[in-house]
């Protein structure tokens, strides 16, 4: 009995250490030295979180829309008058495509998420988003950092932002799935992709952030930004 108990305690302790290190140890280890000048125009992007997933919301400004313009031919209303944000997320094909809500949860997508699955990009067009919502973290970037983030997201599509649409419906009329680069696993999943995207923009994150809350804690610790605490409207 003692050996299984010791093994269980070791596994729990190792998991705790991995999570703690993932949050406490910054990546990159050294803080970026480039300072933003006081009068530099800033571009606002959003980190959107739910209990298991994070997305990045880019403003639907002309330069952003131009990078994804080919998606209009697929039926994505990227240039609609009411479009304010382009929301992008990376994830496992089975879980992402087949699970629009918890009521749709099935065993096979969960199994693939914890083993290995191909990946897709989810693209959604949204109107106004309340910056006071507790699921929103506001990030202000200078133009070079913003362009680096934009390049990273475009590079995550299998053939760029005019990439191959997945033959599956979106969750509504304003979103679509596209083929993505890379393989998905729950230990290196959507939130790890989001952290990589933020680091491409020069934002320090924790070393390993497999859950949204770990990413949020690491941003609060290493960058000093955290989700809004206002009225979710």
Image (spheres, rainbow, N blue to C red):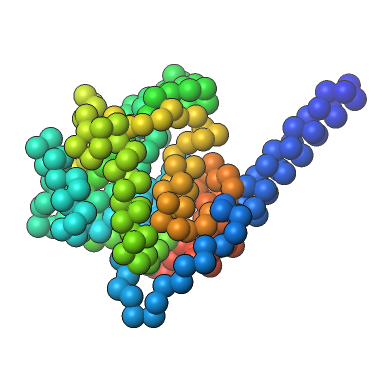
Q: How far across and down, in percent of the image, does residue 92 sit? A: 40, 30
| Image: 22 above or below 2 | below
Residue drawn at (19%, 37%) of the image? 162
Q: Residue at x 48, y 22 (%)?
A: 116
**Lateral position of residue 108 relative to residue 172, left or right:** right
Please, is residue 126 above or below residue 233 in the view? above
**Residue 51 can be seen, yes or no:** no
Task: Write the residue at 78% across / 29% down.
Answer: 8
- Is 46 drawn above or below residue 93 in the view shown? below
Q: Residue at x 58, y 44 (%)?
A: 208
Q: Quadrant of the N terminus?
A: top right
Image x and y of residue 11, in percent: 75, 32
Residue 93 lies, in percent from the top left, at: 36, 27
Q: Quadrant of residue 173?
A: top left
Q: Is residue 29 left or right of residue 158?
A: right
Quadrant of image for the C terminus = bottom left
């Amino acid at each position: 009995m003692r050996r299984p108990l010791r093994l269980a305690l070791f596994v729990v302790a190792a998991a705790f250490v991995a999570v703690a290190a993932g949050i406490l140890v910054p990546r990159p280890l050294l803080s970026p030295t480039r300072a933003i000048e006081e009068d530099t125009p800033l571009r606002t992007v959003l980190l959107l979180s739910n209990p298991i997933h994070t997305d990045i919301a880019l403003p639907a400004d002309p330069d952003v829309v131009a990078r994804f313009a080919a998606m209009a031919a697929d039926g994505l209303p990227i240039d609609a008058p009411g479009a304010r944000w382009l929301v992008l997320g990376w994830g496992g094909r089975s879980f992402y495509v087949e699970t629009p809500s918890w009521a749709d949860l099935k065993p096979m997508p969960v199994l693939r998420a914890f083993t290995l699955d191909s990946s897709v990009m989810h693209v959604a067009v949204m109107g106004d988003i309340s910056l006071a919502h507790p699921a929103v973290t506001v990030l202000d970037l200078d133009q070079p950092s913003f362009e680096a983030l934009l390049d990273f997201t475009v590079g995550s599509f299998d053939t760029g932002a005019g990439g191959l649409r997945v033959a599956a419906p979106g969750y509504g009329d304003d979103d679509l799935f596209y083929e993505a680069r890379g393989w998905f696993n729950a230990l290196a999943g959507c939130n790890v992709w989001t952290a990589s995207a933020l680091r491409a923009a020069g934002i320090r994150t924790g070393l390993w952030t497999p859950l949204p809350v770990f990413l949020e804690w690491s941003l609060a610790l290493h960058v000093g930004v955290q989700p809004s605490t206002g009225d979710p409207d």
